[in-house]
Each structure stands twice: as C-alpha cells, then as structure tokens.
Image: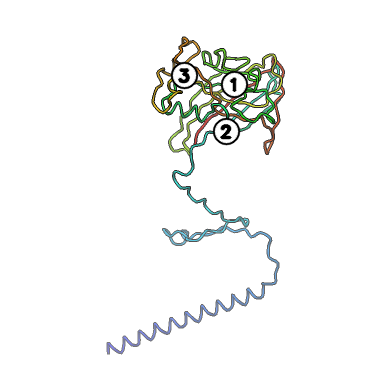
Amino acid sequence: MKHSMGQRNIGYWMAGLCCLAMALCGVGSASGQQNAATSTAAVPAVSTFAPTTFSAVMPGVVAAHPVAKAGGEEEQESPKPRKPGGEGVKVHGHWVIDLKDTDGKIIEHRDFQNSLVTNGALQGGDLGLASVISGDASPGGLSIVFVNVDTATNTDATQYCGGIITPSSCYGFTSSNNIITTAGLGFNAIATGLTSTVILGQAGTTPPTSSLVLSGNFTIPAGLNTINAVETYLSLCEPTDAIAAPGFIKADLAPNACVASQPANPNEYKLAYPLTSTTITSGTPPAVMPLNVTPGQVLTVTVTISFS
C-alpha cells in the first residue's frame, strides 16, 4: 500500500511539472506573437530605462556582464594596467602667468606646460638632477628666467642664457642670495622676490604626487619687450674635481651654503643649469605666441613642478 501511494505521489508531481511546462510554452508563444505584431512599430531613437542588477533580486549576487547605461551610452573598456618599471620618471612644469598693467588690471593670461631640458650642447636639467642625486653637487635653489630670443632659429634651450646667444636675452627672477645673482652666469638683469613652497602629496590621493611651487611678482625691466620662452634654472655648487672625474660623491657644501655670498673658492664651481623650458604658447591646442610686455608692467607667475 505504501508503495502504491508513493507511485501515485510521483504521478501527481509529474503531471504538475507537465502543466507548468505547457503554461510557460504558452506564455512564450503569446509573447512571440505580440513581438511579431509590434515589430513594425516605430522604435524610439533613444531607449532610456533604469537597469536592474542581479543584486536587486538576488542579494549577494553580482552581474557578470556590464549593465546597459541609460541614454545609449557605450560601456568603456577599463584601461590595462601599465607594466611596472616601464613608465620612467617624468618632470612636469605647469606655468600660469598673468600680465598686469601698472594699475593692476590683468591684460593677458597664459597657461601652459613645459618639459625637462635634455640633449643640449651645454648642461641641461638631466645633468643637473643627476649631479644632485649622485651627490656630486649641492643644490642651491631654483629660479625663473624670461628669455627674449628667436626660438624659431634657436632651438637649443641650454644655450639661451650661457652659450652662443647673447646673455642680454635672459632676465632672471629668483630668491635673494641665489647664486644666479653672481656675475658672469649669463643673465642680463636679476630681480629677487621669488618664493618656493614644497607641497607634500597626501596619502590616499591619486596620484599622491608632491610638488614644488615657484611664485612671485616680476616687474618688467627696461630692455625687455618680448618674452619668447621661459625656463626654470637649478643652481648648483660643485667641486672642480667632481666635474673632472664624475661618478663619486664629492659635494662638500651644505645646500644652505650654496649661495651667492659664499666666498670665492678656486676649487668650487657655482653653476646654473636650465632645468625646464618651453616657448610661450596660447590657445587650445597650444600655438607659439610670444608675450609682448612693456617696462613697468608686472608678471604674476606661478610654476608648479611635479614628478611622476
């Protein structure tokens, strides 16, 4: 009897499953007929809907496929991670310059980027940084230089202020006692008042990049009417034997001793290398456009140097 009741129960279950399958087939058939009947109807140009994720109906389950975006937006492919060690070290320089008239009114605004000075006929920023990192030289601070040269024919930034181009083309802006105020380094006029501030990158930011900000107000001196290029300069103090035989740690001055007032020493060079440089540009995309100035006007300048 028990065996007969078990068979009857199984029969009831099988009959129920068959009825359910037939009901589902009926729904699918009706749905298919309805879709066929409406396939000729106009389709909206943009379909907007609120997508439902799997987690809305099955908590804890995440959709394996991208969820369609409203408004017909396409899903963007995530960028592939870069191979560690393949990016290199980059030096960035972001310049913001406001030219102001004598009454303080802004006449012109410029915003542009520059790059590290490398591969020149004379010493550039690559050599300057290597000298400091290796311990061959003591750093003496940074300066800004405004250059009045024909950058179309003179393309070597290492020679703007100390090479074949006349030194009167370069006008420096620096902090007091920086060694570029020392005579003989190739600068026509030097103004002080530049400040430098180190901004430390905050943990958790992306990227957590630290930066060095140079800023100040530079009054246009007599003789400067056009600025074609700008540069940042790295001042260094380096023993003469470090240049004769580089590769060993030979710096013998503390950074606070690498200053213009440091007594002359036949065994110590006072140097200034162009660290970053660029021609003056304007517009989007950037186009070379020199900045015309008049003596007495003021340049409010901010340069942010960062690394990545």
Give the quadrant of residue 145.
top right
Circle on res. 302: none
Query: What residue is drawn where x is 41% and y is 18%?
Result: 254
In the foreground, 16 or 207: 207
Query: What residue is drawn where x is 48% and y is 49%?
Result: 81
Return the x and y of residue 243 as percentages of the image width and height. 46, 23
Q: Earlier in the sequence, mark 1 or mark 3?
A: 1
Instruction: Indicate the amino acid at tag 2.
Output: Ser
Between the C-alphas of marks 2 and 1, the distance is 19 Å
Instruction: Indicate the amino acid at tag 3.
Output: Cys
Q: Residue furthest front?
A: 244
Q: Secondary structure at mark 1?
A: loop
Q: Earlier in the sequence, mark 2 or mark 3?
A: 2
Circle on res. 237: 3
How many C-alpha atoms fall within 10 Å of the one at disc 1: few (<14), some, or many (≥20)? many
Return the x and y of residue 308 as percentages of the image width and height. 49, 37
Per the image, the residue denoted by label 1 is 162
Mark in front: 2 vs 1: 1
* Up-down relation of residue 18 to residue 101 (above or below): below
Instruction: Indicate the amino acid at tag 1.
Output: Gly
Q: Secondary structure at mark 2?
A: strand
How many C-alpha atoms fall within 10 Å of the one at disc 3: few (<14), some, or many (≥20)? many
Per the image, the residue denoted by label 2 is 115
Give the quadrant of residue 143.
top right
In the foreground, 18 or 274: 274
- Asked if the residue under mark 1 is in contact with the one under mark 2, i.e. CB atoms within 8 Å, the reply is no
Between the C-alphas of marks 2 and 3, the distance is 23 Å
